[in-house]
Amino acid sequence: MSMKSKLSLLGMTAIALVMATGAHAQEGEPIRIGAAYPLTGPAATNGLLAALGHEMIIDKINAEGGILGRPVESFTRDSKGTPADATSAARDLITLDNADFIVGGFTSGEGLAISEVALQEEVIYIAASPKTIQMSEDNFHKYMFRTAANTNTEGGSAAIIMNDLGVKRICTMLLDYSYGHDLLKGFKAHLEELDPEAEIVTEVWPALNVSDYTPYITEVMNSDCTGVFSGIWGGLFVPFAKQAASFGFFDQKEHFVAAGEPGSQEIIEELGDDMPTGIWANSYEVWYYPDTEAHNKYLEELRQRLDNPYPPSWPITGYMAVQALAAGIEAAGNTDTDAVIDALEGLTYESAIGPQTIRESDHQANRGQYWGQIAESDEYNFKILDPVRYIEADDIMD
């Protein structure tokens, strides 16, 4: 079965709400975990993959005896990629599905919306993908935790790459909503620390889900910047890259640093020969790095689910969010909300990519960033990140 077929099947299962298996194999009242991901709409591919990772770890937990010896039931609702629909999905998970905890979210707008519901309903929310720093600063509350990187970490890691490339005059191409603006803030702050002489000479702001990037491409090409920092994420990078290549954009601009996970396996394969060689891009996870026992076990599970030796990166988001929540419940010894909050604060848990610590101050995990330069491969019929670099988060989360 192709990945597209598997994702379609997963979408039907997820929309039917109950996705966990083996939920009655253990004794005791089930622990009910709700997930909100975009299962339809423009972000569905990413959302379905995140939901797949969620389902994988729920099945694994139940097969190993549950949490605190109790089975886990999982419910997934469609957030559709919009704040309004994410609000409805989160509220339905709590009020209709009686979820004890919520995980998920995709865009920054979704994350802020789900977080607000969590505050109103006093339910713990683990943000799996949303990165906006607003969630852990101005809109922070005790029920919100994040296993994704934040925009300071992503922007800061991009600044490190740009500084290492020696770029002094920079253009930015960032999406005109909370994620893009917060990403720029993090990038600027860390770039100023690294190289006070570097400057941003041109900023362009495509709207979210714009289809024609031509005006922004030409404005940047007319600028005298030598490096470009982009935040055109995921599947949106595909039409952008094709349009930019038709103008010779990547040949004219010497350096291009792309945040928003365009270096993920799924985007690289979708673009094929159109994936621009030589740019630097990030990814949530890379199947060929690191070569550790925990990561390899996770990859084997994912390969079996998708029948694909080169699995995509997005499932790790849902997988790690549930790993963190399960670790917090185990550490608390019960499912009482305040007890789990206390346990999650400062908790170090073993994730599929190694130990992660959730800060007590803002409930932010020290999730780093995988970066690499897009290169031709002698071994595979697609391009890869070579070299791969993991930039630690601890010094750039703020």
Image (cartoon, rainbow, N blue to C red):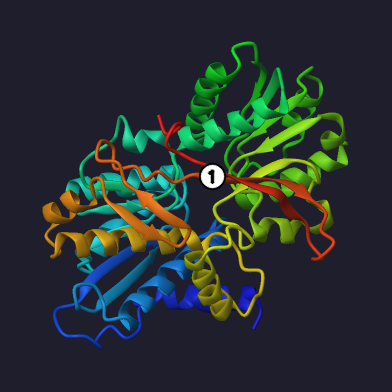
Expressed as whole percent of the image width and height from the top left, the position of residue 344 reads: 24, 51
Task: Indicate the quadrant where residue 201 lies.
Answer: top right
- Left or right of residue 68: residue 47: right
Expressed as whole percent of the image width and height from the top left, the position of residue 128 reads: 41, 54
Q: Is residue 206 above or below residue 88?
A: above
Determine whether the residue tagged by mark 1 lies in a helix, strand or loop: strand
Amino acid type, mark 1: Gln
Residue 174 visible in rendering: no
Taking depth in this image into account, of 386 and 13 the one nearest to the observer is 386
Expressed as whole percent of the image width and height from the top left, the position of residue 43 reads: 55, 56
Residue sitting at x 36%, y 68%: 76
Taking depth in this image into account, of 346 and 248 the one nearest to the observer is 346
Q: Which residue is mark 1?
A: 369
Residue sitting at x 53%, y 18%: 193
Taking depth in this image into account, of 387 and 319 the one nearest to the observer is 387
Residue sitting at x 24%, y 79%: 71
Residue sitting at x 81%, y 58%: 377
Q: Is residue 20 above or below residue 214?
A: below
